[in-house]
Image (cartoon, rainbow, N blue to C red):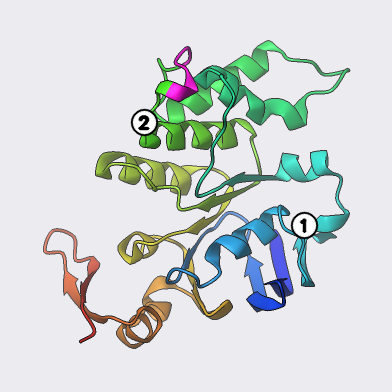
Amino acid sequence: MIMEARNLGWSARGKPIVTGVDLVVNEGETLGLVGPNGSGKSTLMKLLAGIRQPTSGSVLVKGQALEAMPRRAAARLIAFLEQHSETTEAITVKDAVQLGRTPWLTPLQPWSAEDDRIVAQALADADMSGFERRSWTTLSGGERQRVHLARALAQRPQILLLDEPTNHLDVQHQLSILNLVASLPVTSVVALHDLNQALSCDRVGVMSGGRLVALGAPDDVLTLERVSSVFGVRVSIITDPGDGARIFRFHPAS
């Protein structure tokens, strides 16, 4: 166990958005979170990242309460890629990715050649090498998403929290990013809309109405009955003749 949520909840103006979530994240796994719009996925991710303070319950990281950790210490453990990350600053791609090294810099440990190496590797992993001098304002939505991922990778976290990391990306980059995340020596929690992408995770949690209604192996959790009831669609499963993998196909409920 590297992260744990205990009876975690958050409310806005008295309205519960996330309620009573108990969740254990195992070290080294890729945990997918799925659920319809408004199910509380993004709020749960922000609670796990420490960006929002819970109105009930707590988040523990390596046995310590996240809210009690110094911000620098937490940032050395957790990197968070938001669904809609933006900046109005006139910065270059390299500037943006270098921000990921901030938690590791101190007066006694200033910027070094090792930081340059880490930034270059993060850019390469996100397929953004050669973009270093490009201005942020000239990038497409997909390119910006990959820069934010590179910034998170440059942070060298032990836990990587990704809220819709394939948002704005074409199919090729969706696959490359998900394969990269799966190959990294980190623990990953990934909120996804695409249930077929979630099938490749080690475990999947299903959010509905602000609650975690199921958690387990993808084949055990993403059953036809559960997908139909949670997402309000008719669903069938077909088998890929190439590798025998399950693939969801969706149909209108009516």
Q: Position of residue 187 (x, y in %)?
A: 59, 52
Task: Give amino acid for label 2.
Answer: Ser
Q: Is mark 1 on a helix, strand or loop?
A: loop
The residue at which mark 2 appears reads as: 140
Where residue 55 appears, as percent x and y from the top left, is 78, 71
When asked about the image quadrant of residue 17, the answer is: bottom right
The residue shown at (73%, 54%) is 50
Kindly report the secondary structure that dominates the magenta region of the rendered protein: loop
Q: In this view, does 139 lie to the left or right of 151?
A: left
Amino acid of disc 1: Lys
Q: Distance between the residues labelled 1 and 2?
A: 37 Å
Question: Could you say where residue 139 lies in the image, as x and y percent from the top left?
Answer: 40, 26
Q: Where is residue 60 in the image (x, y as percent from the top left)?
A: 77, 62
In which quarter of the view is residue 168 placed? top left
Q: Is residue 197 highlighted in magenta?
A: no
Q: Quadrant location of the N terminus?
A: bottom right
How many circles with numbers are drawn on the protein? 2
Q: In the picture shown, does residue 151 fall above or below 58?
A: above
Segment tinted magenta in the rendering: 132-137
170 displayed left or right of 42? left
Residue 135 among magenta residues:
yes
Seen in the picture, residue 48 relative to 34 is either above or below; the reply is: above
The residue singled out by tag 1 in the image is 62
Depth check, mark 1 against mark 2: the one in front is 2
In the picture provided, is 68 more to the left or to the right than 197? right
